[in-house]
Amino acid sequence: MLAFITKRLAQTIPVIFGITLVVFLIMQMVPGDSAQVLAGEGASKETIENLRHNLGLDRPLYVQYFDSIAGLFQGDLGISAKSHQPVINEITTRLPISVELAFYSTLITIILGMTAGIISAVRPYSVSDMSVMVVALLGISFPSFWLGLILMYIFSVELQWFPVSGWDSVKHMILPAFTLGASGAAIVARMTRSSMLEVVRQDYIRTARAKGIRGYLVIYKHALRNALIPVITVVGLQFGALLGGTVLIESVFAINGLGRLIVESIRMRDIPMVQGGILVASLVFVIVNLFVDILYRFFNRRIDLN
């Protein structure tokens, strides 16, 4: 297991280089001049040039890129062109909010998705199965920001049960987490149903039932455990998608998380902040995938982690 973890962590090194290079090149192709944006519309040409020199934007592109890589090896993600604060400080302030939002959304995804999938699989092609699948289809079809606005209007504006925006209490977390987790729950429900239906047709499930084992024990002790492998894959990928999806939800609910920070930095052409934010989010995604691979072995000892 230790060798597997070490190998997977070593594989992230070229991934990090690729992410930084792609983000850097994309930011260079974005129209506009970050020095002009930061200086303001009324700034003189001399002021803009001085700002470009202070930010190092007048140097060749390859020099700018390799300087950022050199800082990365020292744990320095650079200085924000907008706030003039270390990028790592800004990210460590905003990242926990986005991770917390993604975590609660994932819990909602697992609870709603797996419960719905099991109900559908236990009684396939019944009214309950069809109802759950219709709801799941609607959950996949609705854009998350549209669902967020609808929930905000109903529960915050009309009923006034929850705050409209912010991230200060449990009440603030409910609507954003449910909005972000709803589409993921629909995907998990469909995957759980498909995987469970495949497992319950196996011979050992029929044997367990023939021995007189109670139905719920057959489902939860035998069938569900063996059906979890593909579901774990989907949940792991959903967490990464949820972490990226916080960009829209944080904007809708005015949450000061990492996603909103990246959007604001792109608008200001703050290259160090954008590059650092995307790099950290990508590392979290890699760590989550590593955790998912470890869970494979936990639920199925026959899987060889190489």
Image (spheres, helix red, strand yellow):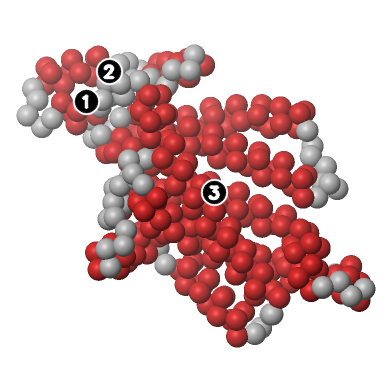
Give the residue displayed 60% in from the left and 36% down from the top: 287
* Tag 3 secondary structure: helix
Q: Is residue 135 left or right of residue 26?
A: right
The quarter in which the C terminus is drawn is top right
Query: Tag 2: residue type?
Result: Leu
Between 265 and 133, the one lying in front of the other is: 133
- Quick check: 250 above or below 152? above
Lower position in the chain sequence, tag 3 or tag 1: 1
Q: Is residue 209 left or right of residue 88?
A: right
Query: Tag 1: residue type?
Result: Ala
User: Which image quadrant for residue 218?
Assistant: bottom right
In this rendering, does residue 62 appear at all? Answer: no
- Quick check: 241 above or below 262? below
Q: Position of residue 140 (x, y in %)?
A: 49, 66
Give the residue displayed 11% in from the left and 21% down from the top: 45
Dot 1 corresponds to which residue? 35
Indicate which label's residue lies in the foreground, 2 or 3: 3
- Quick check: 165 above or below 119? above
* Tag 2 secondary structure: helix
Label 1–label 2 contact, CB within 8 A: yes
- Quick check: 70 above or below 27? above
Dot 2 corresponds to which residue? 55
User: What is the CA distance from the residue labelled 2 to the residue labelled 3?
Assistant: 35 Å
